[in-house]
Image (cartoon, helix red, strand yellow):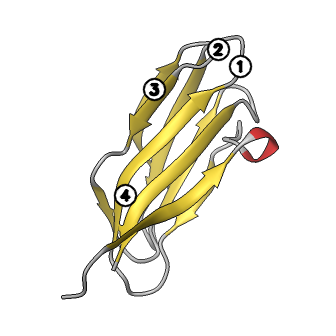
């Protein structure tokens, strides 16, 4: 079995931060295994932000909510989706209360 290699899988800040509408922020590609180590999220807004996260399994018609977090105003942050395996073609989707106010970094391991 091949060894997993740590790396940043996806990130976004400012206008490329988390959106209002449910949007794919990462899709696992190829035949390689993936392990989500953590998703770090940071609130730049002056009001609290609700962040919802979804898994869209490959070939599925609708995403499944897997996590929901309220980030405090002015710098609230969190580490979420810790130690989560995903398969080839699976997608991580997200949405938040206010577009472009929540930055994110998705770290994981790839075979």
Mark 3–mark 2 Cα distance, whole angstroms, equals 15 Å
Q: Mark 3 or 2 closer to N-term?
A: 3
- The mark that comes first in sequence, 3 or 1, is 1
Dot in front, 3 or 2: 2
Q: Is residue 63 visible?
A: no
Q: Please determine whether, in this image, residue 110 is positioned above or below residue 64.
A: below
Residue 21's quadrant in the figure? top right
Name the residue tied to disc 4.
Answer: 36
- Compared with 43, 66 (above or below) is below
Residue placed most toward the observer, 21 or 15 = 15
Secondary structure of the residue carrying numbered label 1: loop
Which label was assigned to residue 69? 3
Q: CA distance from mark 2 to mark 4?
A: 26 Å
Q: Nearer the viewer, mark 3 or mark 1?
A: 1
Mark 3 vs mark 1, CA separation in Å: 15 Å
Q: Determine which residue is flagged by label 1.
A: 45
Q: Position of residue 28 (x, y in %)?
A: 47, 72
29 w.r.t. 102: above or below:
below
Residue 61: x, y in percent? 50, 63
> Which mark's residue is nearer the viewer, 2 or 4?
2
- Categorize mark 1 by other alpha carbons within 10 Å: few (<14), some (14-19), many (20+): some
Is 3 on the left or on the right of 104, as rendered? left
- Is mark 2 in CB contact (under 8 Å) with mark 1? yes
The answer to whether the residue labelled 3 contacts the one labelled 1, judged by CB atoms less than 8 Å apart, is no
Q: Could you say where residue 97 lies in the image, as x and y percent from the top left?
A: 67, 25
Q: Which residue is mark 2?
A: 74
Residue pictured at 44% horizontal, 68% vertical? 90
Q: Residue at x 18, y 88 (%)?
A: 1
């Amino acid at each position: 079995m091949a060894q997993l290699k740590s790396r940043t899988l996806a990130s976004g800040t400012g206008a490329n931060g988390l959106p209002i509408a449910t949007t794919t922020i990462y899709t696992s590609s190829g035949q390689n295994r993936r392990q989500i180590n953590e998703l770090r999220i940071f609130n730049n807004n002056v009001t609290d932000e609700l962040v919802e996260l979804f898994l869209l399994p490959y070939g599925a018609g609708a995403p499944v909510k897997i996590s929901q977090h309220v980030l405090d105003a002015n710098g609230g942050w969190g580490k979420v989706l810790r130690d989560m395996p995903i398969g080839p073609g699976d997608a991580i989707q997200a949405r938040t209360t206010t577009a472009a106010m929540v930055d994110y970094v998705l770290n994981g391991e790839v075979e």
